[in-house]
Image: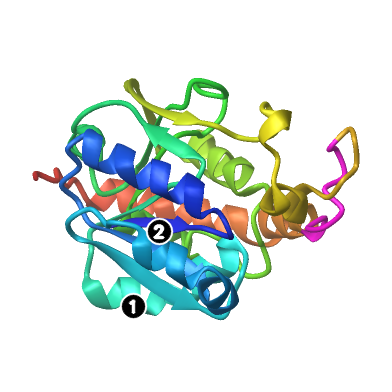
C-alpha cells in the first residue's frame, strides 16, 4: 500500500497520479488530504481521475507526519505486508516500479530508489517498508511530534546501523522538490520551510530537528535491538 500525503497541490497530484498510470502501477494507494484542504479544493480533487485501486482518505491532521499517524490504525486493519511513502512532487518514470521494489523486500528491510537528485546518498524516491520492520522499530513511519522534516535522516540512521536499508537505483522516481526548483515554489513549500532565504532554519516546522534528536537519544538503541532480533528470526520473500 502506498501512502501519499498531499497539501493544496492538486496540479502536482494530477501529474503524479498520471505517472502512476503511465508506469503500469498495479498496487493500491491512498491520497491523504486534510479536511480543510479538501473543502477548499473540492472540485479540483473530485475532477482527478484516480488510478485503479487508489482512493482518498481525509484527516484532521495537516502535516505528513500527522496524516500518516492518523490513518495508521486503518493501515494496520488492512493487513498490508508493506507500506510505501511518496510525495505529491514525485514523478514516476520506471514502468512496474512497484513490483521491482517489492521484490527487494525480505520482511526485515526497507528499500529506496533513484530520485534523480539526492540518491544514493539520501533515502529518496519511494521509501517502501516491510511491515515487520515498522512494527519492530515501533513507530508508524513518523515518530510522535515529527511533522515533515528529518524523517529521511531518522530512517537512514536506522538503516545504516542495522543493515536494513537497500537501494534499487534502476528504479527512477524523480523528485521535483522546490528546494532545487525555486521558480516553482508554492504556499505548501513556504509552509514547510518558511521564507528564510538560505532555507537552513525551517522556521515553520523547526521542532522536527529536536524530535529527531530526542528520538535517537531515547529510542534508537532499543529499536536497533528489536530489529536485530527480527532479522535473526524472519526471512520473507514477497511475491506479487
According to the picture, the residue beneath numbered tag 2 turns out to be: 134
Q: Residue at x 62, y 64 (%)?
A: 63
Residue 142 tag number: none
Which region of the structure is painted magenta? 199-207
Quadrant position of the C terminus in the picture = top left
Residue 97 within the magenta-colored segment of the rendering: no
In the image: residue 182, left or right of residue 96: right
According to the picture, the residue beneath numbered tag 1 turns out to be: 74
Q: Residue at x 28, y 42 (%)?
A: 20
**Secondary structure of the magenta portion, mostly?**
loop
Quadrant position of the N terminus in the picture = bottom left
SS state under label 2: helix
Compare residues 34 and 187 and report the one nearer the observer. Answer: 187
Q: Position of residue 96 (x, y in %)?
A: 18, 33
Asked if disc 2 and disc 1 are in contact, CB closer than 8 Å, the reply is no
- Residue 168, placed above or below residue 201: above
User: Dot 1, how many residues are within 10 Å of its Cα: few (below 14), some (14-19), or many (20+)?
Assistant: few
Display colour scheme: rainbow
N-term mark: 2 or 1: 1
Instruction: Choose mark 2 or mark 1, whichever is in front.
Output: 1
Amino acid at each position: 500500500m502506498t501512502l501519499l500525503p498531499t497539501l493544496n497541490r492538486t496540479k502536482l497530484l494530477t501529474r503524479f497520479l498520471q505517472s502512476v498510470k503511465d508506469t503500469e502501477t498495479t498496487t493500491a494507494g491512498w491520497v491523504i488530504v486534510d479536511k480543510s484542504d479538501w473543502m477548499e479544493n473540492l472540485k479540483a480533487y473530485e475532477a482527478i481521475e484516480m488510478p485503479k485501486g487508489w482512493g482518498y482518505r481525509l484527516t484532521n491532521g495537516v502535516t505528513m507526519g500527522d496524516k500518516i499517524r492518523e490513518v495508521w490504525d486503518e493501515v494496520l486493519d488492512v493487513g498490508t505486508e508493506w507500506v510505501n511513502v511518496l510525495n505529491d512532487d514525485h514523478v514516476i518514470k520506471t514502468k512496474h516500479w512497484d513490483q521491482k521494489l517489492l521484490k527487494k523486500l525480505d520482511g526485515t528491510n526497507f528499500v529506496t530508489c533513484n530520485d534523480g537528485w539526492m540518491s544514493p546518498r539520501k533515502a529518496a524516491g519511494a521509501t517502501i517498508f516491510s511491515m515487520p520492520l515498522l512494527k519492530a522499530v515501533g513507530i508508524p513511519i513518523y515518530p510522535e511530534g515529527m511533522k515533515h522534516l528529518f524523517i529521511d535522516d531518522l530512517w537512514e540512521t536506522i538503516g545504516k546501523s542495522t543493515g536494513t536499508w537497500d537501494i534499487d537505483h534502476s528504479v527512477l522516481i524523480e523528485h521535483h522538490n522546490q528546494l532545487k526548483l525555486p521558480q516553482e515554489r508554492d504556499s505548501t513549500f513556504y509552509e514547510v520551510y518558511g521564507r528564510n532565504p538560505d532555507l537552513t532554519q525551517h522556521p515553520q516546522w523547526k521542532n522536527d530537528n529536536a524530535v529527531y534528536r530526542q528520538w535517537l537519544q531515547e529510542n534508537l538503541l532499543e529499536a536497533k535491538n528489536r530489529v536485530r532480533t527480527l532479522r535473526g528470526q524472519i526471512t520473507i520473500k514477497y511475491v506479487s
